[in-house]
Image (cartoon, grey):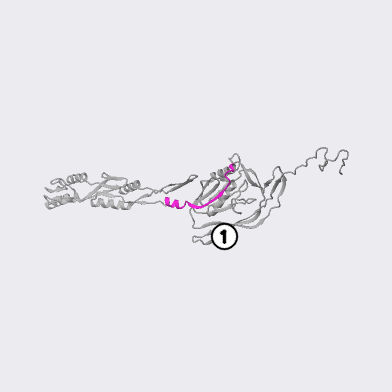
Amino acid sequence: MTGYGILTLLLAGSFLFPCGRVKQGVIVDGVAVGGLPYAEAERRVRERIESELAPLTVHTPRGDFTFRAELSFTDDVSKIVRRAKKGQSLNSTVVREWADAEEQLEKICELNAEESRCAEVSFSRAGFRFTPEANGIVCDYRALLSDALTALKEGGTDVTLKTCERPPEVTEAVLRGRTRLLSKFTTRFDGSNIVRAGNIRLACTRIAGSVLPAGGEFSFNRTVGKRTKENGFGEATVIFDGEFVQGVGGGVCQASTTLFNAALRAGLEITESRNHSLSVGYVSPSLDAMVSEYSDLKLKNNYPFPVYIQSRTGRDTVTFEIYGAPDGKRYETESVILRKIPPEPPKTVEREEAGWIRAEKEGMVSESYLLVYGQNGELLSRTLLRRDHYAAQQGIYGEPPPAAEEPAPEGEENDGIQEPEGEAEKIG
């Protein structure tokens, strides 16, 4: 082989096998590498780069997260040491890389993100209790990833997680708007009638705090329970078979009637109600609601949100309040007497003292209507609720028996005139 061929092979080998040396006096990134083999020069420069590699810190609301060991880098050291001229001082171009950046940044977002919490409302006899809502935190993951990769490329050392608050769908303000007073109705009773008043209060206590969900139905009998002594009710006047008599649970019908009228004014649907056989004095005809073992008062909530039933009793009053989300309408009732039915003449019976045993009571045929008004006060509809027949009640009056005639004294005539002895004449 000629000398020229050998020289050619040697030159080719210098490129195929990196065993050359850096020119004398070369400094790369502050590391003197002159005269060193290329591989050794690269190793030393890269050790310096690695020791001085800037970390990346991610600032978040939950604290800072700094990444150093997770970072790697690429550089042009190999090219620099081979092309450097004698005595040159050069700096390499270093680009940091982060292999699992997506996974790590996603975990940071998960740690900082929070689900929003809707406000809540609870209801009981004590009234409403609201739990405020809490805003959620949403993290901008895509922006964080982009900022991080840009910082790595351009030599930045800090990025900040961008977050924003996300309010929940249901806030306390929304719930308060759904729990406004829809209606209120009050009737009066004789507070001195202790047992009857107690029955009314007991029934109202069991109803107070009731929640009727959207589309749900309320049953008076199911809520109040049977009117028995075992269930806490006492004996008071009730209407039975057209008569006022003593019965357990007397007065409960005034509670059901008061609730019935409040429900009508709240726009609830009445799915079951029935009138008494005799008219009552605490509400207009055809607006009473008799309840018994076989007759119930049932209400249906056709609103898209729950309604809440509250009850209050005073010394001589019972009030029902219904809360919910107003529909923009106003509901009123109307009572119409179609015909009056006079009672039969009073019946007289004997008793020690004169006076009415049972007052006479006029009967009637009546109707009730539901009137619905719009927001501007215009009448939208007038719907028949019920047509009822109330029986007349015959009065009963007690009179003492007539006084018995006293017998005449012995020896006297019936006319009380004393005749002369021996000339008496019997009056026939």
Residue 30 percent across, percent down from the top left: 15, 47
Badge 1: residue crowd in 10 Å (few <14, some 14–19, many ≥20) = some
Residue 237 is one of the magenta-drawn residues: no
Horizontal side, residue 352 vs residue 26: left or right: right
Q: Secondary structure at mark 1?
A: strand
Q: Amino acid at mark 1?
A: Arg
- Residue in front for this viewpoint, 236 or 56: 236
- For residue 1, say whether it is visible: no
Residue 229 percent across, percent down from the top left: 60, 39
Quarter-of-image position of residue 231: top right
Residue 324 percent across, percent down from the top left: 49, 52
- The residue beneath circle 1 is 382
Horizontal side, residue 336 vs residue 210: left or right: right
- Residue in front for this viewpoint, 58 or 311: 311
Magenta stretch: give its range: 172-194
Residue 405 percent across, percent down from the top left: 78, 42
Image quarter where the C terminus lies is: top right
- Residue in front for this viewpoint, 86 or 56: 56
Residue 182 is one of the magenta-drawn residues: yes
Q: Write the residue at 62% across / 43% down.
A: 236
